[in-house]
Image (tube, helix red, strand yellow):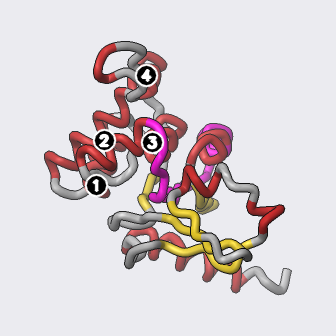
């Protein structure tokens, strides 16, 4: 069995996981960034105080072995009314966090419901507000604002979380495996 751990979020993780899911003898773990603050995810973070569900939702759908209609349901985005712009899956994950009191536990439950092949693991269970200090000492806060900044042209001094963020224990275990594997294969 080959263990593969991906780290990231968004469309890139969705694409990679969708391709890896159908390989034989592969154990997949997706470590998902938790700093997204845009779109539906940003609204749910602000209004409900939940962790950002969007990137987690995409990874769950990528690894789901459920029927196509269920995958479409989780990705369904409302186009009108007060839910306009929200995907059903984001609302579903936010509700699971509220019901269980723990986002990571909600992700485990969603994984069972969606028949996920592998593990989808939030990197942290803490609110993670990404910030960047540019070379000109300008502070940019929030993943969306950072994405819309020409960092390559401006340069930066450091990228950091605005608040104290602890690594999720399950993510730490997957990360430790990656470090062990890398160290054991460094001479090859």
The foreground one among 165 and 115 is: 165
* Residue visible at 50% across and 70% down in the picture: 174
Q: In this view, does 79 lie above or below 177?
A: above
Precedes in sequence: disc 1 or disc 4: 4
Query: Alpha-carbon neighbours of circle 2 within 10 Å: few (<14), some, or many (≥20)?
Result: many
Q: Which mark is on residue 54?
A: 3
Mark 1 or mark 4, which is nearer to you? 4
Is any part of residue 31 visible from this angle? yes
Mark 1 → mark 3, Cα distance in angstroms = 13 Å
Precedes in sequence: disc 4 or disc 3: 3
Mark 2 → mark 4, Cα distance in angstroms = 14 Å
Precedes in sequence: disc 1 or disc 2: 2
The reply to whether dot 1 and dot 3 touch (C-beta < 8 Å) is no
Q: Which image quarter is the N terminus in? A: bottom right
Mark 1 or mark 3, which is nearer to you? 3
Residue at image mark 1: 103
Instruction: Give the structural element (helix, strand or loop) at label 2.
Output: helix
Residue 8 on image: x %, y %: 59, 57
Residue at image mark 4: 77
The reply to whether dot 1 and dot 2 touch (C-beta < 8 Å) is yes
State which region is magenta: 16-39
């Amino acid at each position: 069995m080959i263990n593969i751990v991906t780290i990231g979020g968004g469309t890139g993780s969705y694409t990679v996981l969708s391709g890896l899911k159908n390989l034989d003898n592969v154990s997949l773990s997706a470590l998902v960034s938790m700093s997204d603050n845009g779109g539906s995810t940003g609204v749910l973070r602000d209004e409900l105080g939940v962790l950002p569900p969007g990137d987690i939702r995409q990874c769950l759908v990528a690894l789901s072995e459920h029927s196509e209609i269920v995958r479409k349901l989780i990705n369904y985005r409302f186009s009108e009314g007060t839910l306009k712009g929200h995907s059903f899956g984001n609302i579903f994950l936010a509700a699971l966090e509220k019901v269980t009191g723990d986002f990571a536990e909600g992700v485990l439950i969603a994984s069972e419901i969606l028949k996920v092949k592998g593990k989808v693991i939030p990197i942290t269970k803490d609110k993670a507000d990404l910030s960047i200090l540019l070379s000109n000492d300008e502070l940019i806060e929030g993943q969306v604002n950072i994405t819309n900044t020409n960092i390559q042209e401006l340069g930066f001094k450091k990228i950091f979380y605005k608040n104290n963020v602890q690594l999720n224990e399950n993510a730490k275990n997957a990360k430790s495996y990656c470090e062990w594997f890398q160290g054991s294969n460094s001479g090859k």
